[in-house]
């Protein structure tokens, strides 16, 4: 009993919800400032989110772009490659989604699929996997040399916490879509995924584009920590415009509104 209490006390205390919301809003305000700086300076930013299934990548991405302009910050989450795409150079399907000047792209999984799910599930050959490990560092160095700011996050979640989140998705109907057959299969291949991740890090944790590991056992902590780190990766200035005075509306000079009966309204089910 004493050992159980000691083990429980060693776990980090979760941040208070009110404190979390306050800190999140402050960080999101800074993200808006960063967005304006990216646009002003014509920066090209790529942020990659990888990690275990149910590690919390989607939640972080959602909080990052929640208040941002989708014309400047967009999320890329590609489906499985088509038959045609499977015959292309591996990185080819990702290149069209890279940012132009003044844009930030958030990759919800990326070209690292080949080093993870494709390797573990046998969707690529050993030769294709080895070629990826050879070519990926060169591809990323080329991106950096071209002027792209490349930031890579790996979300680390414990076996126990992943299992808890899987069970939660089974119990809550609005979350069941998150459990794909691939997610279920990954449960029985935890060790294989760990080995694949270790090999991936050994080849692709390069000086020009290192991996940053996010401890995501506590989602709220992971969100705040990741966003704060992202903000620290780009030196930006506050370009918030001065308060704007709204112009006066034009005077009504004989305008006659069409009859309401000529329009089709949404039924007012809720008062």
Image (cartoon, helix red, strand yellow):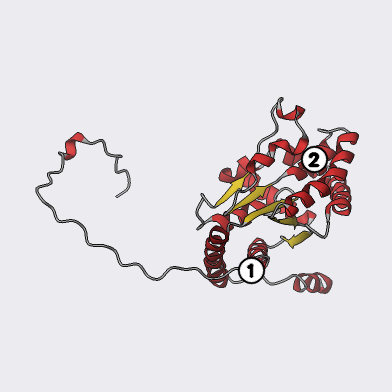
Q: Which mark is residue 114?
A: 2
Q: 97 left or right of 192?
A: left
Comparing 78 with 93, the one in front is 93
- Dot 1 falls on a residue whose secondary structure is loop
Q: Secondary structure at mark 2?
A: helix
**Quadrant of the rendering where the N terminus is positioned:** bottom right
Q: Residue at x 21, y 58 (%)?
A: 249
Q: Is residue 22 left or right of residue 258?
A: right
Question: What residue is at 29 percent from the left and 43 percent from the top?
Answer: 268
Question: Is residue 121 among what the camera can see?
Answer: yes
Give how far across and how far down residue 111 sits, in percent. 75, 43
Mark with earlier residue (1, 2): 2
Q: Nearer the viewer, residue 120 or 27?
A: 27
Q: Is residue 78 above or below residue 31?
A: above
Residue drawn at x 69%, y 34% is 80
Q: Which residue is mark 1?
A: 235
Q: Residue at x 50, y 54 (%)?
A: 69
Mark yes or no: residue 172 visible: no
Instruction: Pinpoint residue 139: horizontal percent, then vertical percent.
Output: 79, 46
């Amino acid at each position: 009993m004493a050992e159980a209490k000691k083990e429980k006390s060693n776990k980090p205390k979760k941040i208070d919800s009110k404190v979390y919301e306050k800190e999140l809003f402050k960080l999101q305000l800074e993200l808006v400032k960063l967005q304006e700086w990216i646009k002003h300076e014509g920066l090209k930013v790529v942020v990659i989110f990888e990690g275990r299934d149910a590690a919390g990548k989607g939640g972080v991405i959602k909080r990052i772009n929640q208040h941002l302009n989708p014309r400047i910050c967009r999320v890329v989450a590609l489906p499985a490659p088509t038959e045609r795409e499977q015959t292309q150079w591996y990185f080819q399907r990702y290149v069209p989604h890279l940012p132009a000047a003044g844009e930030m792209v958030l990759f919800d999984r990326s070209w690292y699929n080949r080093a993870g799910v494709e390797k573990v599930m046998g969707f690529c050959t050993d030769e294709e996997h080895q070629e990826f490990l050879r070519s990926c560092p060169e591809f990323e160095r080329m991106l950096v040399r071209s002027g792209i700011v490349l930031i890579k996050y790996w979300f680390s979640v414990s076996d126990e916490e992943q299992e808890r989140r899987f069970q939660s998705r089974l119990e809550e109907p609005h979350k069941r879509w998150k459990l794909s057959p691939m997610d279920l299969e990954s449960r029985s291949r935890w060790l294989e995924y760990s080995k694949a991740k270790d090999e991936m890090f050994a080849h692709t944790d390069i000086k020009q584009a290192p991996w940053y590991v996010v401890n995501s056992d506590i989602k709220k902590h992971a969100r705040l920590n990741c966003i704060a780190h992202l903000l620290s990766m780009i030196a930006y200035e506050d370009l918030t415009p001065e308060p704007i005075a709204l112009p006066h509306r034009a005077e009504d000079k004989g305008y006659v509104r069409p009859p309401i009966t000529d329009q089709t309204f949404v039924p007012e089910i809720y008062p």
